């Protein structure tokens, strides 16, 4: 019988989460280790191996595992390498897929975290059965995975789909961590929303519940909590964020004509506060041929498991 399980690994800048997943998309076992703990990448792989083998034994041993999928910052699907990731303790080019394959003795594949989320959504979530959609992850940054004709778009070099680094504000835009200015990420990520709040509060004098929080401590969650209570400035922040996202989405539709855009991440929890201005501004900026055609959906994956599920979905394809 073919091995019934795969492993999904989600490597974040702080923590690495992992799980054993069956064909239905159930996470049977899960665990985590600290990504930042080891400056030597070999020691990180050793700790990951030890932690994973514990739960692999619980499901019947390594022969039950078909393969390993990993989602990682700056992960390149073509090469299996993590390349020059700014938030990881190991610099340069690290051949993670090969290291995992050698350590565990099963096939391994790797992609970046947003692409992993798109694969998870297509395999187990809201985009099941769809051949053309765009996944947008709204977290600390803005990530994206683009699926066309049922295939994830990797581009010539493996790094296609950096929609968070398209320019949304051309003149005097905010400086982005990537070195550019005016990137979509600097306005519509969770950190971007907090930045908008600080700017508005400094420019304006009107009352706001947000004034009860030290300026530098404001988070996107604080803005959400204030908006739910009807705070005018907080509602304006959501309208502004949604306007920029909607305008950007209209541009994204123009180049790939997706059936849907699926939104995932912390900001997606804001529901209609973010979705209504996004939808209104997207529709307003779409060519008539696409108006009313493109679905805007929230991810159907449980946030705690989504990245692990997405990474695991890579492993089903491995030979």
Image (cartoon, rainbow, N blue to C red):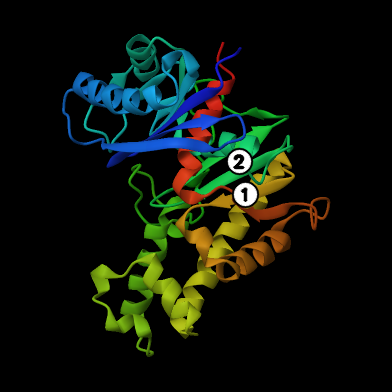
Instruction: Residue at 49% x, 17% y: name it.
Output: 64
Is 241 located above or below residue 169 in the figure?
below
Task: Name the secondary structure under disc 1.
Answer: strand
Left or right of 127 in this view: 26: left
Location of residue 108 (image quadrant): top left
The foreground one among 40 and 284 is 40
Is 12 located above or below residue 4 in the figure?
below
Q: Position of residue 120 (x, y in %)?
A: 57, 37
Q: Nearer the viewer, mark 2 or mark 1?
A: 2
The foreground one among 38 and 136 is 38
Left or right of 119 in this view: 306: left
Location of residue 121 (image quadrant): top right
Location of residue 189 (image quadrant): bottom left
Residue bearing the label numbered 1: 262
Instruction: Residue at 24% x, 69% y: name it.
Output: 216
The residues tagged by marks 2 and 1 sit, at their Cα atoms, a distance apart of 8 Å
Instruction: Residue at 72% x, 61% y: name it.
Output: 283
Task: Name the secondary structure under disc 2.
Answer: helix
Is 59 located above or below residue 287 in the figure?
above
Instruction: Residue at 57% x, 66% y: name it.
Output: 271
Q: Where is residue 66 in the image (x, y as percent from the top left)?
A: 52, 17
Q: Is residue 172 at all visible to an observer of this figure? A: no
Which quadrant would the C terminus be assigned to in this image?
top right
Left or right of 49 in this view: 271: right
Which quadrant would the N terminus be assigned to in this image?
top right
Q: Is residue 57 at all visible to an observer of this figure? A: yes
Residue bearing the label numbered 2: 121
Marks 2 & 1, CB-CB < 8 Å contact: yes
Numbered label attached to residue 150: none
């Amino acid at each position: 019988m073919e091995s019934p399980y795969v492993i999904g690994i989600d490597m974040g800048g702080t923590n690495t989460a992992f799980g054993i997943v069956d064909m239905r998309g159930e996470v049977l076992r899960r665990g985590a280790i600290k990504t930042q703990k080891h400056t030597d990448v070999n020691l990180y792989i050793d700790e990951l191996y030890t932690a994973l083998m514990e739960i692999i034994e619980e499901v019947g041993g390594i022969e039950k595992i078909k393969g390993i999928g990993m989602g990682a910052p700056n992960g390149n699907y073509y090469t299996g390498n993590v390349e020059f990731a700014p938030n990881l303790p190991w610099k340069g080019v690290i051949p993670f897929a090969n290291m995992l394959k050698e350590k565990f003795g099963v096939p391994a594949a790797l992609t970046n975290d947003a692409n992993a989320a798109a694969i998870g959504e297509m395999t187990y979530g809201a985009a099941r059965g769809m051949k053309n959609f765009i996944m947008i992850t709204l977290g600390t940054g803005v990530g994206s995975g683009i699926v066309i004709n049922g295939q994830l778009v990797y581009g010539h070099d493996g790094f296609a789909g950096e929609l968070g680094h398209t320019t949304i504000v051309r003149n005097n835009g905010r400086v982005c961590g990537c070195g550019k200015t005016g990137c979509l990420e600097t306005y519509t990520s969770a950190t971007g929303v907090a930045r908008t709040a600080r700017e508005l509060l400094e420019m304006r004098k009107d009352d706001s519940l947000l004034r009860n929080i030290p300026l530098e401590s404001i988070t996107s969650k604080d803005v959400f909590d204030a908006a739910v209570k009807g705070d005018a400035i907080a509602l304006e922040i959501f309208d502004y964020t949604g306007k920029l996202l909607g305008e950007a989405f209209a541009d994204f539709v123009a180049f790939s004509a997706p059936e849907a855009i699926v939104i995932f991440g912390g900001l997606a929890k804001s529901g209609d506060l973010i979705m209504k201005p996004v939808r209104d501004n997207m529709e307003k900026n779409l060519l008539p041929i696409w108006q009313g055609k493109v679905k805007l959906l929230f991810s159907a994956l449980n946030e705690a498991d989504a990245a692990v599920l997405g990474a695991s979905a890579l492993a089903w394809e491995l030979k």
